[in-house]
Amino acid sequence: MKITIVLVAAVLMTACAILAFALPGGQEAAVSTKDKKGKKMHEKIVKTEEEWQKQLSEEQFYVTRKHGTERAFTGEYYNSHDKGVFTCVCCGQELFSSDAKFDSGTGWPSFWKPISEDAVDVNTDHSYGMARTEVLCSRCDAHLGHVFDDGPAPTHLRYCMNSAALKLVKKN
Ligand SMILES: [Zn+2]
């Protein structure tokens, strides 16, 4: 019995040592790949599911970390006309200005452009048998919603967001 425990401990320690050597190299490789693409570097926020769960409400966690969608006409901001900046509910990054918000009639807060090109990332989403473009916070990869090409001028884009992914910082 004792020998088994000693053996298991030895194997675990070896595994830890290998990981400690392997990890820094892996991270460097990821960074240099990004540089080659010429993409602007972000200070990424990475947390475990448990950490996000502690910080967020059930609805916020479901939408942002589980790629969920809140029910239409139920969110806090679909009918909001307050002025300010909509920030990421997870990490606080500024995402959309109220100046680019419009009434889409969909029941979700809708914008015709993000506050800056770097604020959001997009990703093709094939869930539910549709090809949609998912919109994520560029800093913490929170799922925010989707972008469609039936929005108003000048961009003709409609960033269809979930209220649960946003936090409005009001400006007077
Ligand atoms: Zn974020």
Image (cartoon, rainbow, N blue to C red):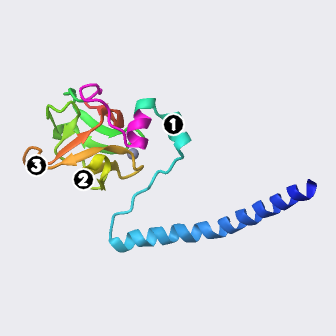
Image height of 117 relative to 107, above or below: below
Identity, as a three-letter code, of the amino acid under mark 2: Ala
User: Which secondary structure type mostly characterizes the magenta part of the structure?
Assistant: loop
Proximity of marks 1 and 2: CB atoms separated by less than 8 Å: no
Which residue carries the number 2 mark? 131
First of labels 1, 3 by sequence position: 1
Q: Secondary structure at mark 2?
A: loop
In magenta segment, residue 104: no
Q: Amino acid at mark 3?
A: His
* Ligand 1 quadrant in view: top left
Give me the C-alpha separation between circle 1 and circle 2.
29 Å
Q: Amino acid at mark 1?
A: Gln
- Say whether residue 21 is left or right of residue 3: left
Q: Position of residue 46 (x, y in %)?
A: 49, 51
Q: Residue at x 24, y 26 (%)?
A: 73
Which residue in the structure is indicated by mark 3? 156
Q: Which residue is mark 1?
A: 53
Magenta segment: does it hold 69? Answer: yes
Quadrant (top left, top right, bottom left, bottom right) of the C terminus? top left
Q: Residues within 10 Å of mark 3 (few under 14, many from 20)?
A: few
Name the one closer to the observer, 42 or 70. Answer: 70
Q: Which residues are magenta?
A: 60-77
Q: Residue at x 85, y 61 (%)?
A: 7
Q: CA distance from mark 1 to mark 3?
A: 35 Å
- Depth check, front residue: 4 or 58: 4
Q: Position of residue 43 (x, y in %)?
A: 43, 56
Quarter of the figure with residue 61: top left
